[in-house]
Amino acid sequence: MKKIGLTLLAGASLLLFAACGNSSEKAESAADKEEVIVGLDDTFVPMGFQDDQGDIVGFDVDLAKAVFDLTGTKVKFQAIDWSMKETELDNGTIDMIWNGYTKTEAREKKVLFSDTYMENKQVLVTAKDSNITSFDAMKDKVLGAQEGSSGYDTFNNQPEVLKDIVADNEATLYASFNEAFIDLENGRIDGLLIDRVYAEYYLTQTKKADDYNVIESPFKAENFAVGVRKDDQALADKINEGLKKLQENGTFAEISEKWFGEDVSPE
């Protein structure tokens, strides 16, 4: 019995040591790393997505590289399940969420945000032949949204706009907007609540802009920012300093022109 007790005590000590080690590792700022890991939804055009060659490209990808190039830090881009993004961040699988990530009160309880670097709005996309040209026209219609998206959060937080009127008072959820657009094109959903930056880029690149309505929403404008762990102020400061320098030296404007045809710097 004494031997068993000593074995259990030793095991407990090892578990305690491991826990302490993990805690210390987690407390270390990613700002000091030689390589940082950015978590993203790799289907979110034009912010971060896979091109025809399978490379991850996009506005946020170029912006992140430019920010960390200032300090000679390497950047790795890791595709994640967008609905699990905060969990991935908390577990240390990634160091930041940088992919058209909207700053909200609910998310501020989970992550520490950088300064805002871009504005976005939610829009409703419908087929031209559906005759749905307003939010009110979605009454008893089937709505699609991305799971874990700010659009879906807003859908639930302001139910009087859409939730109370659409079919079943719920949205059909998708892992990515790509999948949602396929269902919209095939008539399996009647409307798609989506980020304007995605809708405009996708419809332009696929030359389908004439086939769809892009309806402005009554929802407030959203602010895109980078999310880091709550205890990593040093990384947030590093990102903020980098964004400021890129805006001052014109690099931010160059990246904006490349992806949007205009400077989207915050005023």
Image (spheres, rainbow, N blue to C red):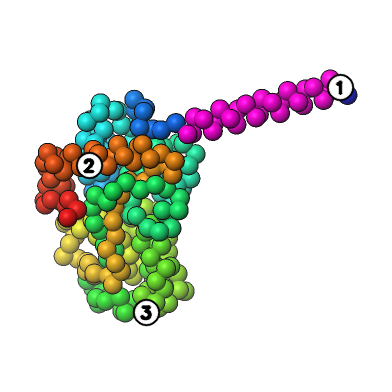
Residue tagged by mark 1? 2
Q: Residue at x 31, y 39 (%)?
A: 237
Indicate whether residue 215 is drawn in magenta.
no
Residue tagged by mark 2? 243
Q: Secondary structure at mark 1?
A: helix
Q: Is residue 129 left or right of residue 35?
A: left
Q: Percent x, y for residue 12?
A: 71, 28
Indicate whether residue 9 is drawn in magenta.
yes
Amino acid under disc 2: Leu
Q: Residue at x 12, y 38 (%)?
A: 249
Asked whether the beta carbons under mark 3 and mark 2 sit within 8 Å of each other, the answer is no
Quadrant of the rendered structure where residue 145 is?
A: bottom left
Q: Residue at x 36, y 52 (%)?
A: 176
Amino acid under disc 1: Lys
User: Which residue is at the front of the view, 100 or 237?
Assistant: 237
Tag of residue 139: 3
Q: Percent x, y for residue 68?
A: 26, 33
Looking at the image, residue 138 lies above or below residue 52: below
Amino acid under disc 3: Lys
Considering only order in the chain, which callout, 2 or 3, is on the residue closer to the N terminus? Answer: 3
Q: Which residues are magenta?
A: 3-27
Asked whether the beta carbons under mark 1 and mark 2 sit within 8 Å of each other, the answer is no
Looking at the image, residue 24 lies above or below residue 103: above
